Image (cartoon, helix red, strand yellow):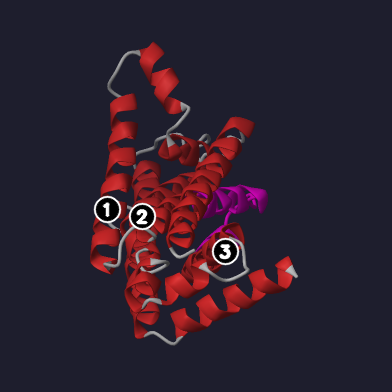
Amino acid sequence: MIVNNILAIIQKELQSYFDNSLAYILAGVFWFISGLFFIEILLGEQGIIQQIALSEKAGVNLTYVDAPTELLNSFLATLGTLSLLIIPILSMGLYAEERKRGTLELLATSPITNWVVALSKLIAVTMLFIFMLLPSFVYETIAFSAATPSVSLSVPLLANLGLILMSSALLSLGMFISSLTTSNILAAILTFGLILILWLLDLIINNISVLSANNLSHVSLLESYSNLIQGLVNISDLVLFCSYIFLGLFLTSQSVYLLRSNHQ
């Protein structure tokens, strides 16, 4: 029963996304910008291939240059930044639109639990985000298939998994913010503000004492994401992503629970 409810809500959410032109506009803009950055990072005047060619002409020893890894790190870092800018738009209507239409009250009084609804909405919007990443997977596959020696498939998979986990964690928090207001714009602004705070937290970590930085790094999503795109797998990073996702789900379910209580 629970699985059927989750699948039904996911289907409803995905249908609402793809019935709306905003999803296609966002995807198109994201694809265009990410494609430009990929080309620039790989083939631009300051790109990796050009820098390697110049180094070879200068007689520099390139034995230890790992071009695929440099490409992956640079491109995924760029995708991470683009994702931070687009996540508020993806998450803003998860609950705010339903509050605005008055359908959230019906949802709050339905027999479906708040956790099921929140989890289903998060899965759906994460699937939409993965859909937006598909062209990037193609870029990476084409570039890495031409690399010599060949690149292990686990390297780009791990890096992209890190991007999906980070984005899912932020979407979860954005979903909570969306459940607090009827305004999509306000939800987007507040979510962006929260992301900005987390971004600044990462900058603070890089500019304070080692002891304090070590303590703050345990709550830094960007720090954990940076580890994954560099191929560093730490259980603590995975736990951090899951903790943020759980926190967003918990806060959202409590927000809807309060709404449910007010209608009983």
Cα separation between marks 3 and 1: 21 Å
Foreground mark, 2 or 3, reads 2
The residue singled out by tag 1 in the image is 190
The residue singled out by tag 3 in the image is 123
Q: Looking at the image, which is closer to me, 126 or 228?
A: 126
In the rendered image, is residue 108 in sight?
Answer: yes
Looking at the rendered structure, the secondary structure element under dot 1 is helix
Cα separation between marks 2 and 3: 17 Å
Quadrant for residue 105, please give it.
bottom left
Give the magenta range: 139-167
Check disc 2 and give the amino acid type: Ile
Q: Looking at the image, which is closer to me, 211 or 254?
A: 254
Q: Residue at x 51, y 36 (%)?
A: 227
Q: Residue at x 39, y 55 (%)?
A: 174
Question: Within 10 angstroms of label 1, few (less than 14), some, or many (20 or more) residues?
Answer: some
CB of mark 2 within 8 Å of CB of mark 1?
yes
Tell me which secondary structure the magenta stretch mostly adopts. helix
Left or right of 119, for residue 194:
left
Check disc 3 and give the amino acid type: Ile
Task: Give the quadrant of the N terminus.
Answer: bottom right
